[in-house]
Amino acid sequence: MPDSPSPVATPATLKPGVVTGADYQTLVSACKRGNYALPAVNVTSSHTINAVLEAAAKNKSDVIIQLSNGGAQYYAGQGLPNGDTAKVLGAVAAARHVHLLAEHYGVCVVLHTDHANKKLIPWVESLLDHSEEEIKKTGKPLFSSHMLDLSEEPLDWNIDECARVLKRMAPMGMCLEIELGVTGGEEDGIGGDYDESADNSKLYTQPEDVLQAYDKLAPIGKFSVAASFGNVHGVYKPGNVKLRPEILKNSQDLISKQHNTGPNPLDLVFHGGSGSEKSQITETLGYGVFKMNIDTDTQFAFAEGLGKFYEQHANAFKYQLDPESGAPLKKYYDPRKWMREAEKGLVDRLGEAFVDLNSAGKTLAV
Ligand SMILES: [Zn+2]
C-alpha cells in the first residue's frame, strides 16, 4: 500500500482586528514559518495610527502598532498636567482607538508598548491593571504584549523582574518582550547617545544570556527577545553601524540544542530597523525575527509629506487670504488637508517596509 500523503497544513486564518493570546501566537508562528516579519510602528496620534492601519490594509499585511511611554503621553495630550497619568491614559485611549477601528481595515493588529526601563515598570503594571478590567468586560486584554527593557540592570535582576511581570501577563494571554544586550542609541529617553567611534562589543547579545532567560521564562509564559546584533536606534551615516544578523543564529542554535526544540525556538525582535540595509533585514528573517521596529524612518516620512505640502502652499500657513489674489486659502490650511499629506508620507514609507519584511499580501485576516 502506498503511504498516505502527509496532511497539508491549511494556512492559518484569523478574524481581523487586534489579536491576543492564542491568535497572537498563531500570527507569530505564521511569520516565522513563512519567513516574514511585521513592522512594529511607533505611533503618537490618531493620525499616525490611522496611517499605519491604512498602509497595512493597502498592502494586505498584518502589522504591529506600538506606543512608547512618550508616545502614549503625547496621545493623551501634552497639556495634561500629570505626565505619569497621561502615559497610562494615553496608552489606554490609543488602544481603544485601535480596538475599535482595526477590524474595519480588514487586517490583524498586534498592540504593544515599547521600551520600559526600571523606572517605567509601574507604567506597564498600570496598563496590566487596565487589561485585567478589560478582560472582565470583553474577554480580551487591551494590549497583545508589552516590553520591559531592563538591559541596563544586572542580568539576574533583569530576568527575575521579567519573570515576575510575565507571571501576571501569562494568564491574560499576553506576551512579554525582553531585552538582552543593548540596542545602541537612544529611543524616547531610554538608552544613551550612540557613540559611532566606540568599541561596540556590548551591542551583541550573548547566547548564554538568552539561554538563562529561556530557562526561567519559558515555563511561565510566552516571551520574545529583543536581541542585539549591532543594531542601533536612529539613522546614522552609512558604514558606521555594523549589523551582524548571524549573531541571532547563535542564540537560536544554543536553545535548540539544549532544549531539543525545532529550529528557531526563539521569537526575536529587531530594534532600530530604520536606516538598515535591505539585504540585512532579509537575512534576519531566516533567524526567527518576526517583528522589526521602525520609528525614525516613519517619523521622517510623516514630516517629509507635510514639508512638501508646506513648500507648495507656504502662504496658507501665514494668511487666510492670498496676499496677491485675495483668494481664500482655507482649503490649504484646513488641518485635514496638510495632515493628510503627512499621513500619505507615512503610508508610502510603510509600503516599503512591508516589502522589505516580506509581509505584503500575507495577512491572516479573512
Ligand atoms: Zn527599540
Image (spheres, grey):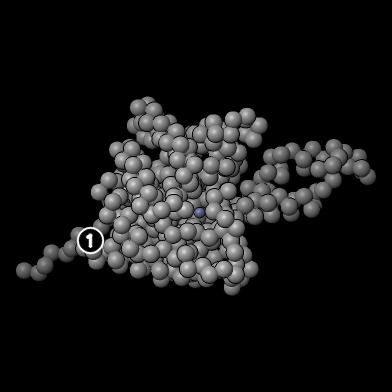
Of residues 212 and 274, the one drawn nearer to the viewer in this rendering? 212
Along the horizontal axis of the image, is 77 left or right of 31?
A: right
Q: Is residue 93 above or below residue 17?
A: above
Residue drawn where x is 45% and y is 40% of the image = 121
Q: Is residue 289 above or below residue 103?
A: below
Percent across and percent down for residue 92 are 49, 34
Of residues 345 and 185, the one drawn nearer to the viewer in this rendering? 185
Residue drawn where x is 18% and y is 63% of the image = 6
Q: Is residue 192 above or below residue 109?
A: below
Residue drawn where x is 48% and y is 64% of the image = 203
Seen from this angle, which residue lies furthest right? 324
Residue drawn where x is 56% and y is 58% of the image = 185
Percent across and percent down for residue 318 are 84, 42
Of residues 141 and 244, the one drawn nearer to the viewer in this rendering? 244
Q: Which residue is mark 1?
A: 259
Would you call the spot at circle 1 few (<14 residues within 10 Å), some (14-19), or many (20 or more)?
few
Seen from this angle, which residue lies furthest front? 154
Along the horizontal axis of the image, is 211 left or right of 103?
A: left
Seen from this angle, which residue lies furthest bottom? 239
Seen from this angle, which residue lies furthest left? 1
Residue 259 can be seen in this image: yes
- Distance from mark 1 CB to nearest ligand 1 atom below 8 Å: no
Percent across and percent down for residue 361 are 45, 57
Percent across and percent down for residue 37 are 43, 58
Secondary element at image label 1? helix
In the figure, residue 334 lies in which quadrant? top right
In the figure, residue 46 lies in which quadrant? top right
